[in-house]
C-alpha cells in the first residue's frame, strides 16, 4: 500500500533533493581543489595537517553560518568531519597510498 503525503511535503522533499544535489556537486568541486593542494604540498614538502589552517577553515565556516542563519553548531560539526576526512585523504596521498 502506498502512503499518501500532503503535496506541500512532496514539494519540500523535491527541494531538499535539489539542495542535496548542489551540496554533493560542491563537495566534488572542493575535492578537486584539495587534489591541487596535495600536488602543491608534495612539491613543497608540506605536511597534510596544518592546524592553523584547519582552525581558520572551520572558524570561517562557523562565522558564515552565524551570518546566514544556519546553525553554527551544525556547521562546526560538519566542517570538522569534512576537514578531517580531507586531511586523511591528503595524508594518504602524500605518502603515496592513494584514496
Image: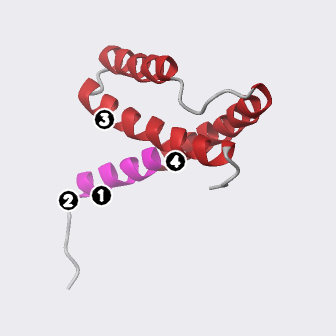
Question: How far apart are labels 2 and 1 at the CA level?
Answer: 7 Å
- Of residues 78 and 49, which is closer to you in this image? 49
Circle number at residue 10: 1
Q: Nearer the viewer, mark 4 or mark 1?
A: 4
Circle number at residue 6: 2
Q: Earlier in the sequence, mark 2 or mark 4?
A: 2
Q: Residue at x 37, y 48 (%)?
A: 16
Across and down, in percent, residue 63 comes to 36, 15
Q: Is residue 53 above or below residue 31?
A: above
Q: Is residue 2 above or below residue 99?
A: below
* Range covered by the magenta-colored residues: 7-20
Q: Which residue is mark 4?
A: 24
Q: Earlier in the sequence, mark 4 or mark 3?
A: 4
Question: How far apart are labels 2 and 4 at the CA level?
Answer: 27 Å
Quadrant in which the N terminus is drawn: bottom left
Q: Is residue 33 above or below residue 93?
A: above
* Tag 2 and tag 1, C-beta contact below 8 Å: yes
Circle number at residue 78: none
For label 3, the SS is: helix
Q: Which residue is mark 3?
A: 77
Across and down, in percent, residue 20 comes to 44, 48
Q: How many marks?
A: 4
Amino acid at each position: 500500500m502506498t502512503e499518501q503525503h500532503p503535496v506541500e511535503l512532496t514539494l519540500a522533499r523535491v527541494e531538499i533533493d535539489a539542495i542535496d544535489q548542489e551540496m554533493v556537486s560542491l563537495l566534488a568541486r572542493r575535492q578537486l581543489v584539495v587534489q591541487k593542494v596535495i600536488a602543491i604540498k608534495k612539491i613543497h614538502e608540506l605536511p597534510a595537517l596544518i592546524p592553523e589552517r584547519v582552525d581558520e577553515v572551520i572558524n570561517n565556516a562557523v562565522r558564515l553560518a552565524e551570518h546566514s542563519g544556519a546553525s553554527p553548531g551544525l556547521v562546526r560539526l560538519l566542517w570538522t568531519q569534512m576537514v578531517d576526512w580531507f586531511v586523511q585523504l591528503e595524508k594518504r596521498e602524500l605518502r603515496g597510498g592513494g584514496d
